[in-house]
Image (spheres, rainbow, N blue to C red):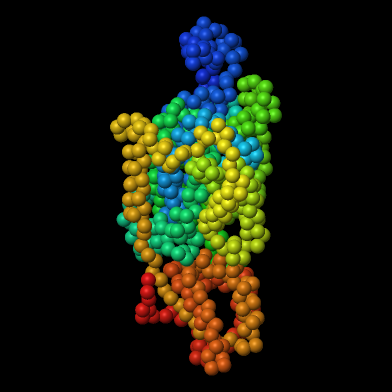
Amino acid sequence: MIKTPDIIVSILYILGIVAVGLWAGRGRLWRPGRRPIKNGRPEENYIPENSTTADRRKKDVSSSDYFLAGKTLRWPMIGLALFATNISCLHLVSLAQSGFDSGLLSGNFEWMAAFTLILLALFFAPFYIRSGVSTLPDFLERRYNRACRDWLTFISILSAVIIHIAFSLLTGGIVLETLLGIDMYVSVTVIAVITAVYTIIGGLRAVVVTESIQTVVLVAGAIVITLACFIKMGGWDSMAATLQATHHMEKLSMLRPHGDSSGLPWYAVFLGYPVLGIWYWCADQTIVQRVLGAKDVDHARAGALFCGWIKILPVFIFIVPGLLAYTLAQKGLLDIHTLQTTDPAGNTVINSKGIYTLMITQLVPTGLAGIIVAALLSGLMSQVSGALNSISTLVSFDLYKRWRPAADEKRLVKVGRIAAGIALIFSIFLLPLLNHYESIFSGINDIIAHIAPPITCVFILGVFWKGASAKAAQYTLLAGSMLGALVYTLNKLYPHTAMAAIPFMMMAFYLFVVCLVMQVVLSLIFPMQHTPESTALYWKSPWEPLRDKGWKGWGNYKFLSVLLLIVMILLYWMFQGQPKEVRRYGMVTGLRPDKTAYYEQLHTAVWPGVLKKIKECNIQNYSIYMQPIDGKYFLFSYFEYTGDDFNADMKKMAADSTTQRWWRETAPTQLPLPETSAKGQTWTNMKEVFYTR
């Protein structure tokens, strides 16, 4: 529980941010001045300098102002808004948890984003600005057909509700319940209503202005707790020494080897993340809408690259604090007993979801803790406000305006506000269902991995390949989305199958390859019949968007892109980590001749579930071979262990119901060798004589 002064600071912050949002949203309506001339005609949304307050209020804001901030956004505001929309309370809490559990591994989701933002700046942003689209579904209709637009609108609204709003509200509710003792659903509802007030009234301008402010507060709060952890720990060297002493130096590695218990080996990161990242940063309405509101192409590009530079920070201010908390706990400098529970087997388990809250209450002085809470609230409000504005844009432009083409600007804005309110209510009702995920960060990426592949495929081919046809894109979106939903459902209903054991990043890559082959083949079967409009909606070559000269000097987009690319490669090289110490175990046992067929059948049915638990217990490259010798059957088993406490991991295995079934049903099929049976020996830690790496 935080103290009264911290609560006061948090309340003052909320009131202040609401006031700023309302002022920003309405400020454009009240700005007097000379009527500007645009294309030889007076601008419509002009308020005379001598007009009365009543006259000014009668003149409503245009939909362009409301949804795209009048296309006046400059690069600093775009970059900060992109970062703020991406970073939320979800990131502070879940990334700290990831740092505590697996070290810097989840930092890949932050640093790989920089590469995707380079793609956004070089290829996608200038393309969207040049085409003059208001929404990404609008682009799909112009490039392909209306069916593609409708499907993407549906997926975009659904993903905004689940990913950007519901998960953020869930995380914020857990934190506020822990810190303030308020019921999770009550606290979430209050924050959601407050956020909706300035978002629904103010539109994108209110969202971007408040996001820019909240980004500063968010980063400042994260820096405060990072410094508190560093001071308590005694610096980076002390943390590294503690990891060395506890045999967990792999926590400093961003890139993990094949078979790592995390399920995120290096190749899964490089193959799977681009599928998720291109959808999220280049084809998701909630994110790209900030770029669509840019003043011009140069500001759009610079804003995206600015966000790419900022994305370097989260590893150090969001994830490293969690890693510091782990080392502090190992040295007895952080009390984590409130997070410890006992599983059915009697083992002590740490529920690390609350580690960030624990750091706030134990490491941050009174007063500063209020800033941290304000940072959490700012992240939550930024995520929700950005998604609400995107939903209102999609519903107004992509649904209502098609149904009522004659609808005026005032009506479109009203419909958008109503849609945002309904989406917010629906998100709150989803909270109990999403709360079943053990790890919120893994849950959100698991869902994205099954949504993104067909959308990423359709956008990439649509932007870069002339031959991508409308029917092929339509069928790919529909079939790819249904396939992703089917795979996701089967993996949740049958979690012990071989398919369910595939890491979600690799699953995203496999689904993307299927969608890519599907669209290419269908485009050859149903060739594209280009219209004069669609002919201008793809790059004639990958070099075409790079012909723009851009700004001169240090702000040139080509120079900034190359510099960012070099910096990211150097960072990955610095944090590639050290290989784990590998211990190898083997076992030989006899097999009853009359049970060989039954053993093979049992291995096929039960083993995939055991394999999933094996990876969680730091075991890799598990192999079982059956070989007849002189009429007798033998099983030769081998695995590599990369953990630090073999006995503890074996206890985890023993507590697993699927593993218990495996041991129980395979025991009658085996004949222990006399020498091992006499000693009660099973697995033997083998001495390495020769091993080819």
Tell me where residue 578 appears, x and y as whole percent: 36, 62
Residue 195 vs residue 14, the one in the foreground: 195
Exactly how many numbered labels are in the figure?
A: 0
Tell me where residue 170 appears, x and y as whole percent: 59, 45
Q: Residue furthest bottom?
A: 630
Task: Give the quadrant of residue 655.
Answer: bottom right
Tell me where residue 212 appears, x and y as whole percent: 45, 32
Residue 156 visible: no
Residue 38 visible: yes
Q: Residue at x 67, y 34 (%)?
A: 422
Q: Residue furthest left?
A: 553
Question: Compared with residue 535, is residue 202 higher up or lower down, i.e. above or below?
Answer: above
Q: Residue at x 61, y 49 (%)?
A: 525
Tell me where residue 653 appears, x and y as whole percent: 55, 71
Question: Compared with residue 655, is residue 88 higher up or lower down, i.e. above or below?
Answer: above
Residue 637 vs residue 12, the one in the foreground: 637
Residue 423 vs residue 344, the one in the foreground: 423
Question: Compared with residue 450, is residue 683 higher up or lower down, i.e. above or below?
Answer: below
Quadrant in which the C terminus is drawn: bottom left
Q: Residue at x 51, y 66 (%)?
A: 615
Q: Residue at x 62, y 21 (%)?
A: 409
Q: Residue furthest right?
A: 403
Task: Give the quadrant of residue 421.
Answer: top right
